Amino acid sequence: MRVAMIGTGYVGLVSGACFADFGHTVTCVDKDASKIERLHQNVMPIYEPGLDDLVASNVRDGRLAFAVDGAEAIRAADAVFIAVGTPSRRGDGHADLSYVYAAAEEIADLMDGFTVVVTKSTVPVGTGDEIERIIRARRPDADFAVVSNPEFLREGAAIGDFKRPDRVVVGTDNERARAVMAELYRPLNLNETPIMFTGRRTSELIKYAANAFLAMKITFINEVADLCEAVGADVQQVARGIGLDNRIGSKFLHAGPGYGGSCFPKDTLALVRTATDAGSPLKLIETTVAINHARKKAMADRVAEALGGDLKGKTVALLGLTFKPNTDDMRDAPSLDVAPALMARGATVQAFDPEGMEEAAKLLDGVVFKEGPYEALAGADVAVILTEWNQFRALDLDRIKLLLKQPVMVDLRNVYRPEDMRARGFRYFSIGRPLDA
Ligand code: NAD
């Protein structure tokens, strides 16, 4: 199959490289010329484990190419994927579909022969109908089908997720499109991945319902963590105790500073909007959004409390800035709320992140960036773990004790064990684990 991937970001680049690895011929298109230029030199525009090798080998074998101008690739394609961004529209929380519709217009003008136009971007219910209308208006006699094929990969584990997904969802009523999609994903038959065919609107909603459910699950355990602190229980054990029940499942039950990232915040907001507009509000998700928003803002208070309530003149060492480990993605990361809130209370913030500092520097005015964790900790009044990168899991605690002005740690990811930290002489604060639990 010949594939054109419009948008070469976290999703487009990973999906394109994986489809090429499945044996298809793929061109990843992006209007950001600097991204394509870097890819031509095999420099990855994003940090994603294993991606550089996957891209290099498929480029070498002639199955993967990159272009700024998508004309040739779109004309030749059996399937054109739209994998452009769908950020929150400023002001109202609706998904901003301008990139998606612009891509649809470009595709309409260029496609040739029967073409399956696939939305991989996360788009609200009904977007497929609008894409179909846009294309039909520009090319009344074109032979095409618009299919929804949402992506469920996680940054940091994206290649494994794409190649071994729990399921693939394809929304279409068109038989010819269905055959093309089945052929594209045929290599997944080997590991018996369920490929679920649905109506297009259903498929579009599945993606939002999945993300909203996961965001709600995280928010649930975060609230339970607060209750644990109030009543002297341990949230880690509560999470394990409920997670072992198959009906609940153990994933996404890690209490922390609140969810962030490029998907959950914008997708929960967009789903709330869709539901309100449809006259069928989702109160659970509205509440989830509100709780999470307040939680991220409240994390600075925890740091202040650890230092006796006042941050004026204090130095805070922030370890981790990205919304989760193994990515350089800073979109809606909790650090974007926490660091400014600390500075607003009069603290100086010195920070380190293994992959996110280049992006963070554009977003976090006033933060002093350091080249390593120990450099960030030197001279600080408190260490705050904000992202659970592996390299923060086994820090040299004796060295930290010497570097900090006083041995205080606020661990917002529950990386360390309270009893160990106490034994080493730290005043240690974590999430949902009171000292006497
Ligand atoms: P991204 O911002 O990393 O990438 C989007 C890319 O599209 C950018 O490089 C941009 O230059 C390019 N682009 C925009 N308009 C274009 C056009 N007309 N022609 C060519 N290129 C164009 O975004 P992302 O994180 O890859 O997300 C893409 C979509 O996938 C979103 O809808 C997102 O919600 C969804 N999604 C993301 C993830 C994730 O983990 N990032 C997971 C599942 C789904």
Image (spheres, grey):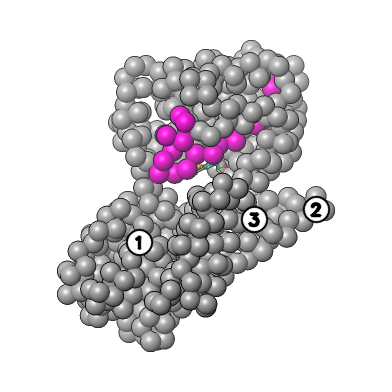
On screen, residue 73 above or below 345: above
Residue 390: x %, y % from top left: 30, 53
Q: Residue at x 40, y 70 (%)?
A: 430
Count of marks, rendered view: 3
Q: Is residue 195 magenta?
A: no
**Residue 415 disc label:** 1
The part of the image, by quadrant, that contains residue 351 is bottom left
Q: Residue at x 38, y 59 (%)?
A: 387
Q: Are marks 3 and 1 in contact (CB under 8 Å)?
A: no
Q: Are marks 3 and 2 in contact (CB under 8 Å)?
A: no
Q: Are marks 1 and 2 in contact (CB under 8 Å)?
A: no
Type of amino acid under label 2: Ser
The residue pinned by badge 2 equals 280
Between disc 3 and disc 2, the foreground one is 2
Label located before the other in sequence (3 or 2): 3
Between disc 1 and disc 2, the foreground one is 1
Residue 227: x %, y % from top left: 55, 73
Secondary structure under badge 2?
A: loop
The residue pinned by badge 3 equals 269
Type of amino acid under label 1: Val
Residue lying farthest to the right in this orientation: 279
Q: Horizontal placement of 360 versus 269: left or right?
A: left
Q: Which residues are magenta?
A: 142-164
Secondary structure under badge 1?
A: loop
Q: Horizontal placement of 281 versus 374: left or right?
A: right
On screen, residue 275 above or below 12: below
Type of amino acid under label 3: Leu
Q: CA distance from mark 1 to mark 2?
A: 40 Å
